[in-house]
Image (cartoon, rainbow, N blue to C red):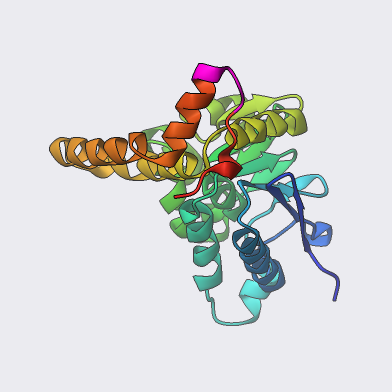
Amino acid sequence: METVVHTTIDEGVATITLDSQRNRNALSRQLLAELHEAIDRCEDADVRAVVLGHAGPAFCAGADLKERSDGPPDSSPFVSILERLMDTDRPTIAAVDGAVRAGGIGLMASCDLVVVNAATTFALTEVRIGVAAAIISVPILRRVSPGRVASAFLTGEPFDAATALDIGLVTHVTDDVGATVDRLCEGIRAGAPRAVAETKRLLRTVPALDRDEAFTRMRALSDELFGGPDAAEGMAAFREKRTPDWGSVRD
């Protein structure tokens, strides 16, 4: 059986590539299992960022409908993938240079940053095969207000990259996905690892907090970080007009 998910690590950035072109990178059992293994490898290597890309003309076509019709459904591996992309301390970047459909949109939306080619099209086609975009509504509706995506959910009509950017589903639209992703990874590597991890966490948690609790928790975090070794190195580097050496910092 050919491998359908490939992982490379270079200068602290892991690139995971979906490569099941025969079914447009559909979410088969094999692809999901290998994607879990790829994320394991990224965690074990303690990389600074994870880029989720693809081979072929489609990022992901959604569920493997042939497998879904062969036996009882089990969505737990897919749910776990979405959770892991959302919860890992490392920033995750979807690098999208082809069409995205159904569950593929959920996979993409689970990443922190979503970089898409200006020619990319999207469609939430679930209703057209008699189901709802249930699982992927979780990451999507954390990015997009329901009213702005209701038409796409209810009709299955395709929409373009400009619309996806306007509603907040994607973060970057570009004619050169690779160059944009490289620039983002360079920026991530420039930050202190813990500072980046805490920033990812607060982006997820602060909006759901009561205002007073948010200020209390964020004040404590700010005081801790400003009193820590990363801040000492970062501020020293600023004074000395040099690049911070995060590798030299020890807690």
User: Considering depth in this image, is 196 or 21 the residue closer to the camera?
Assistant: 196
> Does the segment drawn in magenta span residue 203?
no
Image location (x, y in percent) of residue 155: 51, 43
The residue located at (48%, 54%) in the rendering is 136
> Residue at point 55% right, 81% down?
72
| Residue 241 in magenta stretch | yes
Q: Give the range drawn in magenta.
A: 239-243
Whether residue 156 appears in this view of the structure is: no
| Observer able to see residue 212 | yes
Q: Quadrant of the N terminus?
A: bottom right
**Residue 190 placed where, x, y %?**
59, 32
Most common SS among magenta residues: loop
Q: Is residue 145 rendered to the left or right of residue 118?
A: left
Q: Residue furthest left?
A: 212
Q: Which residue is drawn at 74% across and 57% down?
A: 25
Q: Which of 107/42 is in front?
A: 42
Q: Between residues 63 and 238, which one lies in front from this camera angle? A: 238
In this picture, is 134 found above or below 57? below
Residue 93, percent from left and from top: 61, 42
